[in-house]
Image (tube, grey):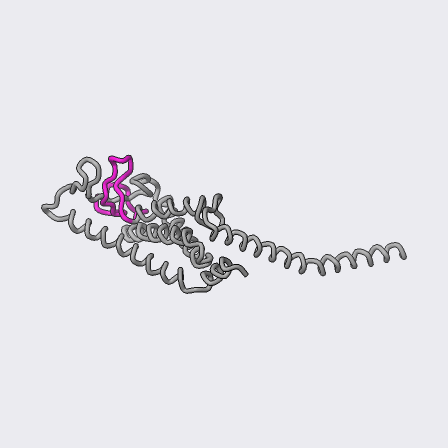
Amino acid sequence: MSDKKKKLIKEKYSTKGSSYWGILVFAILVLVDMLTKLAADVYFSGANAPAKIDIIPGWIALTMTYNPGISYGMGASAPEWVKFLVVIATALLMVAFAVAYFRMDKRRAWMRIALVLIVAGGVGNLIDRIYYRVWELDGTQLDQGVRDMVDLRRFGFAVCNFADFFITGGAVVLVLSLLFFDRDAIWPTTEKYRMLAQEHEAVLEAKKAEKEKQDTPDKQAESNIETKQETSEKNG
């Protein structure tokens, strides 16, 4: 066995890249999102609070808005059942991503990082949607909805929050992993991921061979039954 294969096997069964780290990072990211939302909510709701604080004048500012819609202010006037369905679909999607994370080979680091970022951001905004019951909002409530505070409208975006940044970052990492840094990447750039792809292919081939081996007795039995039936018909 080559040293590279031994290293891959060692990584697979080591505590490095353990799911516990993903849980810790997820908790920290959700906490950061909640704290920044709370801080902005408290500060900008003060009696003498400014409408916004310029970080880079004319480009980036801090402010406070509430999104009662589906995303980026869209869907504020959507029917209640549509908003509720979006909340349910988001929750189910986050559960599916979390399950995928725990079932995934921990050597697929980039893909797992992407899932942690996306789930943390999705859960952060989901908490606001459930807390404010956005499916019951019609857009006239000015202080209810998903809390956003980073104004990036100068760049063609909406007012965002840290959960949005996590989701966007996760999507970027996901695309990079699918292109370059994963076992299933289109153009794997490192020997590690090329070897993982070969290992995965070998596992699939082994499963296919095992299935064919298990099917052989059944096919043989079916063939014997057909032969007996044909013999019986001829004798009859």
In which quadrant is the N terminus drawn?
Answer: bottom right
In which quadrant is the C terminus drawn?
Answer: bottom right
In screen coordinates, is 115 left or right of 27?
Answer: right
In this view, the residue in front, 103 or 132, is 103
In this view, the residue in front, 183 or 163, is 183
In this view, the residue in front, 231 or 55, is 55
Residue at 71% over, 58% down = 216
Specify the farthest residue to the left: 48
Residue at 56% over, 52% down = 201
The percent coordinates of residue 56 (x first, y second) are 19, 39
Specify the farthest residue to the front: 3
The percent coordinates of residue 104 (x first, y second) are 46, 56
In this view, the residue in front, 156 or 208, is 208
Q: How many numbered tags mark residues here?
A: 0
Quarter occupied by residue 31 = bottom left
**Residue 145 on the magenta segment:** yes
**Residue 158 on the magenta segment:** yes
Specify the farthest residue to the right: 235
User: Where is 18 relative to 150, above or below?
Assistant: below
The percent coordinates of residue 221 (x first, y second) are 75, 60
Residue at 10% over, 47% down = 47
User: Where is 137 relative to 206, above or below?
Assistant: above
Tell me where the magenta segment starts and ends, as one range: 134-162
The percent coordinates of residue 23 (x first, y second) are 35, 60
In screen coordinates, is 42 left or right of 25?
Answer: left
